[in-house]
Image (cartoon, rainbow, N blue to C red):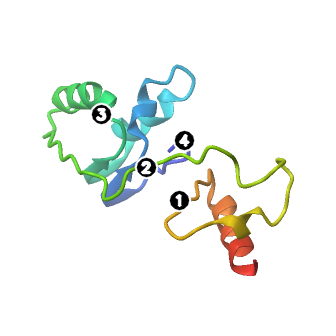
Amino acid sequence: VEMAFTNEDFDVVVIDEIQMIADPHRGAGWTRALLGLRCKEIHVCGGLEARKIVERIAKVCGDEFVLKSYDRFNELEIAPNSLALTSGEKGSYRKVQPGDCIVGFSRNDLFAIKREIEES
């Protein structure tokens, strides 16, 4: 979000983790994206705690606001322990089970994790 291209035109943009708009340290990136992206339609995903601010921003900008809520297919359950015994442990992705969700914070992280899973 912090690196969103605000100088290009898009048909549709998806902004994930919209609840981060309220974060005192990083919220400006989400605000910049929501107000600065040049597109016909914006879909925002994330916690409902951001609903009021997103709705107010849409109203002030003269834009339509439509809320769509979706139910999870399965309950999200956080594992009690990390897959790795230490932060530098290699091979811990061998312990991933079908249905597990892997979270990465950059595209490069996700590709590295994918490679490690495929190699194990």
Asked whether, in this view, residue 74 is left or right of residue 68, the answer is right
| Disc 1 versus disc 2: nearer the observer | 2
Q: Upstream in the sequence, badge 2 or badge 3?
A: 3
Q: Mark 2 points at which residue?
A: 76
| Disc 2 versus disc 3: nearer the observer | 2
Q: Upstream in the sequence, badge 1 or badge 2?
A: 2
Depth order, front residue of 84/9: 84
Task: Give residue 110's quadrant in the image.
Answer: bottom right
* Residue sitting at x 31%, y 53%: 72
Which amino acid, mark 3? Leu
Which amino acid, mark 4? Glu
| Disc 1 versus disc 3: nearer the observer | 1
* Residue sitting at x 16%, y 29%: 59
Number of the label disc, if any, that sits on residue 101: 1
Q: Mark 4 points at which residue?
A: 2
Residue sitting at the far bottom: 119
Q: Is mark 1 on a helix, strand or loop?
A: loop
Residue neighbourhood size for the residue with mark 3, other residues' Cα within 10 Å, grouped as few (<14), some (14–19), many (≥20):
few
Asked whether, in this view, residue 28 is left or right of residue 103, the answer is left
Q: Is mark 4 on a helix, strand or loop?
A: loop
Q: Distance between the residues labelled 1 and 2?
A: 9 Å
Q: Is residue 31 above or below residue 91?
A: above
Number of the label disc, if any, that sits on residue 37: none
Residue 74 coordinates in the image, percent (x, y): 35, 57
Q: In this view, does 112 lie above or below 86?
A: below
Q: Name the residue under label 3.
A: 48
Depth order, front residue of 37/43: 43
